[in-house]
């Protein structure tokens, strides 16, 4: 079984914990209202909520996938997911300005933006001396 919860390599530690808490909460809600507290189902529903901003689109997506929940449950489930979903942290103004300057520098001076490579040897190697003759 493959989980959609992203590991620390893709999400920060705090975001991963928030995501796990969200999955757990949705599992609990599903178990309380439907009697099925399946983690994979919870992750699928969270994914649908992420893809559909408003409640009506979310409900349509659920119905298209065979889930027929009462309107009140869909509304509360969507609100819960939106509220507990880890927020994407925007770049700080300082970081965004630095990135913008780097992009402009790369556009103006593309040769200077290239990665360094090993230095080239401009002089030929000294000739190799033949080995000394063996003693008689």
Image (cartoon, helix red, strand yellow):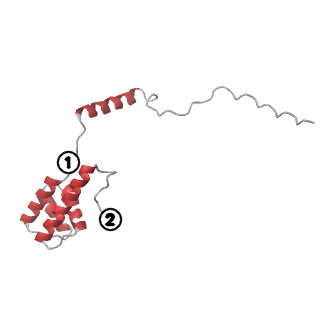
- Which residue occupies 32% across, 65% down? 2
Residue 67, percent across and down? 17, 70
Quarter the C terminus occupies = top right
Name above or below for residue 82 compared with residue 66. Answer: above
Q: Which residue is mark 1?
A: 87
Going from N to C along the chain, the mark reached first, 2 or 1, is: 2
Residue 46 x/y as whole percent: 20, 60
Where disc 2 sits, the SS reads loop
Residue in the image at 25% along x and 38% along y: 91
Q: Residue at x 28, y 58 (%)?
A: 5
Residue 92 spot, x, y in % from top left: 23, 36
Q: What is the crowding at mark 2: few (fewer than 14 residues within 10 Å), some, or many (at least 20)?
A: few
Residue 98: where, in percent of width, then height? 30, 31
Q: Is the residue 64 above or below the residue 80 in the image? A: below
Q: Is residue 121 left or right of residue 107?
A: right
Asked if 71 appears above or below 125 in the picture, the reply is: below
Q: Is any part of residue 40 visible from this angle? A: yes
- Give the SS element for disc 1: loop
Tell me the quarter of the image containing the N terminus: bottom left
Residue 123 appears left or right of 43: right
In the image: residue 89, left or right of residue 118: left
Name the residue at the right extreme.
136
Measured Cα–Cα span from mark 2 to mark 1 = 23 Å
Q: Nearer the viewer, residue 61 or 25?
A: 25
Q: Residue furthest bottom?
A: 35
Mark seen at residue 2: 2
């Amino acid at each position: 079984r493959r989980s959609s919860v992203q590991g620390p390599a893709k999400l920060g530690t705090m975001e991963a914990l928030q995501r796990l808490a969200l999955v757990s909460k949705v599992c609990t809600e599903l178990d309380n209202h439907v009697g099925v507290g399946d983690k994979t189902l919870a992750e699928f529903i969270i994914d649908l909520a992420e893809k559909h901003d408003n409640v009506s689109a979310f409900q349509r997506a659920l119905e298209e996938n065979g889930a027929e929940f009462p309107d009140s449950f869909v509304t509360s489930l969507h609100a819960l997911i939106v509220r507990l979903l880890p927020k994407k942290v925007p770049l700080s103004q300082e970081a965004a300005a630095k990135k913008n300057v780097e992009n402009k520098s790369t556009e103006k001076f593309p040769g200077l933006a290239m990665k360094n490579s090993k230095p080239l040897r401009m002089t030929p190697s000294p000739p190799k001396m033949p080995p000394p003759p063996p003693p008689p």
